[in-house]
Image (tube, coloured by chain):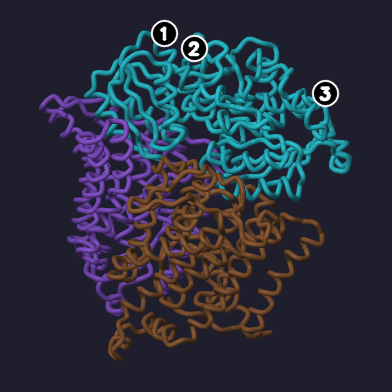
Chain colours: A cyan, B brown, C purple
Amino acid sequence: MKKLLLAASAASLLATSAFAEVKVGMITTLSGGGAGLGLDVRDGFLLAIEQSGRDDIEVVIEDDQRKPDIAVQLSDKMIQSERVDVMTGIIWSNLAMAVVPAAVNQNVFYLSPNAGPSALAGKGCHQNYFNVAWQNDNLHEAAGAYANDAGHKKSFILAPNYPAGTDALTGYKRFFDGDLAGEIYTQLGQTDYAAELAQIRASDADSVFFFLPGGMGISFLKQYADSGIDLPVVGPAFSFDQGILQAVGDAALGVVNTSQWNKDIDNPTNKAFVDSFKAEYGRLPSLYASQGFDTANLLLSALEKADPSDANAFREALRAAEFDSTRGDFAFGPNHHPVQTIYAREVIKEGDVFTNKIIGTALEAHSDAYAAECKM
Amino acid sequence: MRVTERYINGVVLTGLLVLPIWALAMDEPFTITLATRAVVLALAAVGLNLALGLGGMVSLGHAAFFGLGGYTMGILAYHAQTYSTLNLGLFSTDGTTSMPLIWLSAMVISALVAFFIGMLSLRTTGVYFIMITLAFGQMFFYFAISWAQYGGEDGLSIYVRNGFPGLNTLVPIQFFGICFTLLCIVLFLFARLQASPFGLALNATRQTRSRVQAVGLNPTRIRLLAFVLSGAITGLAGALFADLNRFVSPTMFSWQLSGELIVLIVIGGVGRLMGPVIGACVFVALEHFLGALTDYWHVYLGVVLLCIVLFGRGGLIGLLTGKEGAHV
Amino acid sequence: MSSILIVEQILNGLQFGVMLFLMAAGLTLIFGVMGLINLAHGSLYMVGAFAAAAVAGATGSFFLGLVAALASAALAGAIIEIVVIRRLYDAPHLDQVLATFALILIFSEGTRWFFGSFPLFLNIPQALSGPVTLPGGIEYPLYRLSLIVIGVAIAGGLWLFIERTRIGIQIRAGENDREMIAVLGVDISKLYTLVFALGAALAGLAGALVGAIQSVQVGMGEPVLILAFVVIVIGGIGSIRGAFIGALLVGLTDTLGGVFLPEFLGLFMEPGAAQKSGSAIASMGIYILMGLVLIWRPTGLFGARA
């Protein structure tokens, strides 16, 4: 939880705090188990702000420790005592649900760089809430669509027994046309998948879909590779991202995963982003870093046109989303969630580093299943 | 310089009251929120202190009651918010956003569950008691995670704060006032109970169980009653905590939270009236200021805790008054 | 459900159980001999896994990684025993819980400080990777099979060590009467450091062995720690035999419960709902088991003292 005063030029650092015109509050996870994701979002976001050269933006960064009650407390602090104009940064859906509804109702704008719970895309949508990443179901839906393209007819699907897990399996089933060979809800935080692997082996599945974020996915993939089961695996990008691929190792090679971003998407913004991120932080950017970067650029594009104090004009400027995204074209749907292309990627090895390359498109100009329920 | 405990108690309570009023004057609403957080955590720890400090029952599962109180608030308010009926099998009810009603429900439910857990756990002692209470806490934790109807791991967001007749609870200082008043009432009852025959008997069961038996009292029954009261108070705190955050989630049931409640008591002083209050203030302050200094503030928190355990027997109050606290 | 699947699931339960035993053995020894509750045992498990990952990554040898895990966990154990734990032997349980809780905070954030926030890589050795075919046509990963063998061998070795060696006799004597063996000329503080380091080494070994098929990350020790506590409470605190039986019971209950409960509920519920409620109840399964055991025998299956 450290306060960062950000200035494009070091010389104007003092001036920044005194004359900052726009205040951005970032609540994200910087300590504990999920810290890797928050660090990436933060670094991507700050990189874009720095590159903009603007010295009138102050970013206040706080660590939520992945605890909802801490996040709410920080959000109160951001709104009541820091009096921020815009908030961003939350990684986890449950934290977003704790913070976002109250924040947007207090006339703060919230730009989500990662979480996209269905409640905020449908009935609970809000004019001050913009999601720059994806609605939670999106990548799973794309995985289902990809499975059809790949000719899979019978999938074995598994996810942890919690709301995002249920959403994941629902999303996959929404687009997958084949049958299910099995559907398992595992325990949240489970690290041993021997029992599930035995069930997969005993089933007549021709493919496996899983959503197991973080350490769970690492464990599953290692054990899957060791089990001798050789069915093709499909999953969302979360278990194959730059931050954790190195920990999975060879076990992930060749696995197909779905993502709205990859470092080889061919556009100038993305190229510049990947290069400058590597130069600045000495590692390859991840999906989360790209989302943080895009979020900051969306914000910057809106600030060019309007001031947050003029809420209506600022909202229109955000909705227009006229910025160069690392994903190429970017547009918001009616519920302020992205309408975007989702790609199928494959895990490869570049020298010593495991990374992804795009092998095809899973869904074009994809919105989400909840947009119709949103009445703004 | 040695000071009396009574003097410290007065200073702490006054300080806790003056700080938010000062913050109000200075227009620093977040300080009021922090103070409210300290007060609510203190209330939860006062509940635990009844079992742990007076009765010697080291419960590593008190988060169960904290969470139950929180979910009672969450579920009742959720049904009021969605105008749906809460079906309890035998009878059904509408939700409510009335604080007194929610508090009463939270306390009754926590007390009932504490009675059940206590009946089973108090058959054991020592480490086994610590572990069985931990196990009960974990059961609730896993149950809450997979209870999809009320949000599972995502938890439940409540969009407005519940109401108290005559007050606007969304104003930080007014909500603080409610919590502070409740804390004072509970502290008053705690002090009365400590000095009552029941309190003395409870204290005796902690020290020499067999003698209590010898004078014709039933130690298990005394301990059970204390455990139930303790659960009810922690449940009440849970309901307030949920209102403070306008949010409940399974983390309220986590064993780390049970651990933190114990930490609060030990920082202040085990079995002392104001021990948990001082502990909560120090903890919230540490969390706030250490957290601002470094991302790795847990390391320092750990070191501070170690020092308190190794060198500061009797907690801060013990340190100031020069008297050791109760032995558990 | 075929019988092959059932046998495979029982093997999985056993494998989980013997790994839990490695954790639980140290915990129960430390409690039995020194009367200390060590919440930081999970941190030693994490230390072992991180040391193994770091050394295996640098040298390319899994075996060296295991040696590093044993050594570093034993060293970390000895250090915290000498610096902190030693002062807590006569302290109330409450102080022990608190001080070792503090150690968890220090270890977890310290490790993150040192190794960063991303999980580390540790893979199983080439020689042990892939499945083997067991009699009856069961395909089972060789590495997991090795874990069962290693775990059972260590359990046997530990039993011999405690029952047959001179140090083992001192340890057992220490459990019964601390003052007496001090009077008999045994250097009690050295003995305690040794027992603590031994328990730590076992935890570190478990961390490294399991880390190869799971994720080596900060906080990996805490879920296992809680399970290990459940194990020793079921088995009776202080009893190695109890820890072994308890570990197998917990391993089997957890694995088989997760598989068969949803199937069982599926007999009278629709599949999706049966899956969800089945896995919800299964996740509480071991705690229910522990509650039942304690209600039946308040000091666990083989526990002598409270």
- x%, y% of residue B238? 51, 59
Query: Viewer-nearest of labels 2 and 3?
Result: 3
Give the labeled residue for mark 1: A149
- Residue A199 is situated, as x and y percent measured from the top left of the image, at 25, 28
Above-or-below relation of A307 to C88: above
- Amino acid type, residue under disc 1 in the picture: Asp
What amino acid is labelled 2 in the image?
A: Ala
**Which quarter of the figure is the C terminus of chain C placed in?**
bottom left
Corner quadrant of residue B27:
bottom right
| 3 or 1: tag closer to the N-terminus | 1
Q: Chain under label 3?
A: A
Q: Are marks 1 and 2 in contact (CB under 8 Å)?
A: yes
**Crowd tier of the residue under label 3, counting other residues whose Cα lies within 10 Å: few below 14, some 14–19, many 20 or above:** few
Tag on residue A362?
2
Query: Whole-Å distance between the Cαs marked 2 and 3?
Result: 34 Å
Residue B278 visible somewhere in the drawing: yes
Q: Give coordinates of residue A155: x percent, y percent.
A: 33, 19
Q: Both on one chain, marks 2 and 3?
A: yes
Between B75 and A317, the residue placed more toward the observer is: B75
**Residue indicated by mark 3:** A305
Label 2: element kind: strand
